[in-house]
Image (tube, grey):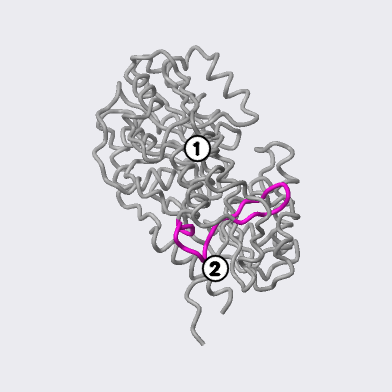
Amino acid sequence: MKAMTRRRIVYDITRLVSRIRDRTPNGIDRVDFALANHFIKADDPDRSGMMNMALGPSLLTPRAAREALDNIRKHWGEDEEPDSDPHYLEVAAALDGEAVSKRVSKGRSGQYREALAWVRRHGLPLGKSPRKFLADGGVYFNVSQFPLEFDRFFRWSADNPAIDNVFFLHDLLPLETPEYFLPAEYPRHRARMETVARRARAVIVSSCVVRDAVRRCLADLGRSDIPILVAPLPPDPIFLRRTTPPPAAGGAYFVACGTIEPRKNHLLLLHAWRDIVARLGAAAPKLVMIGERGWENEHVVDLLERCPGLRGHVIEASGLTTPSLKRLLLGARALLFPTFAEGYGLPLAEALAAGVPAIASDIPVFHEVGQMRALMIDPTDGPAWREAICAYAREGSPERQVGLERAARYTPPDEAAFFAAIEAFLLDLRR
């Protein structure tokens, strides 16, 4: 009997397709896209995508799934150079002092035109169950955690034991730190984990911290038998390409990257910046906050829009492409990441992979992900963050030089090894 070398896979692209409404990818989007990009090829008949529709799951042809992914990447502008990105150019102008605007937030156009063209080519994905595609066995792979809160979307595979449902779980933070999320997120995430306990053959996570949390949760739900693979996330290859940092734009600046919501702790940075501006005046460094406005962020928005001390020193930007993000990182004195909790913390890995110093929260997952290559500070210690920022901002800063040397010793997870580990894990489920 010929040994199995790979498995037939149906990859759920429901959430990715829905992200056509968003200008740029967030962390889950990046992971979801990277894995979809690996598994879905236009000419591979054994692997394809599916979408969960109102009437049930619907299989796409490999070519249709591939084109959907390509449309999303194009919409996000992932292949655009920063000099062609109007969002980047506006941020650069603000750093140079040539613009008074401190909020850069613009939409993109044309995404729905591409989607309609896709429907004309392939038709609406209705009535094509993945059950037949996986009738002889295979993997249903969900990386987005959507729509795990609705168990009915996963019943199609229940009567075929040869179908393995595999879920990538990014974190359990809505259960562990519900105070940072909207109230509805706790029961929603609990429902997701109940679906995993009921339907999963295996789980993949990105860190040992998340693995341990998932194990505890699944044990409480009576499923301590589910195998869990830890697969540390490789940064996008663009962050590994060594390029010359751009000339300093209007003086020293720092970058913070993440949705503006309570867990990311932007409030600490803005209070620190107000103190730094009061101390240094026009010589104070600038802060570029990259990310969409999220939830329960009234205090942060009030500071951004109404605090005189921050005017001209803080630039809020959303809609930047990944190449633009990298260029801003390269010119920054450091990435600032004062978050209270993370499942992984992809911006930290991306900055270090690009050789950029990082100042990050002293939390267990960053010990693991950052390999102790960042300066780590308690996320509640405002004075320590303020002093570290001032030290890194100074020209010829010995503290920043240490940060550069730390970043140079960072070893990012290997992309090929990441995909190989997942392929082997999926294959081993049937051995």
Q: Residues within 10 Å of mark 2 (few under 14, many from 20)?
A: many
Return the x and y of residue 342 as percentages of the image width and height. 55, 46
Q: Is residue 42 magenta?
A: yes
Give residue 196's quadrant in the image.
bottom right
Q: Quadrant of residue 136?
A: bottom right
| 231 vs 13, nearest the viewer | 13
The magenta stretch spans residue 124: no
Residue type, numbered disc 1: Glu
Q: Please give the name of the residue rendered at 44% of the width and 21% of the height, measured from the top-left corner.
A: 314
Q: Which residue in the protein does label 2 denote?
A: 8
Q: In which quadrant of the rendered image does the C terminus lie?
A: bottom right
| Up-down relation of residue 195 to residue 136 (above or below) | above
- Would residue 186 appear left or right of 397 to someone viewing this image? right
Q: Which residue is mark 1?
A: 114
Query: Residue 257: x and y, percent?
Result: 47, 35
Give the mark, 2 or 1, whose residue is nearer the N terminus. 2
Separation of residues labelled 2 and 1 (CA atoms): 29 Å
Q: Nearer the viewer, residue 23 or 412?
A: 23
| Mark 1 surroundings within 10 Å by alpha-carbon count, few (fewer than 14), some (14 through 19), many (20 or more) | some
Could you tell me which secondary element the residue under label 2 belongs to?
loop
Labels 2 & 1 near each other (Cβ < 8 A): no
Q: Which element type, helix, strand or loop, lies under badge 1? A: helix
Task: Give above or below for 55 relative to 101.
Answer: below
From the viewer's perspective, is 186 left or right of 97?
right
Magenta stretch, residue numbers: 38-59
Residue 242 image point, x, y percent: 27, 45
Q: Amino acid at mark 2?
A: Arg
**Circle number at residue 243:** none
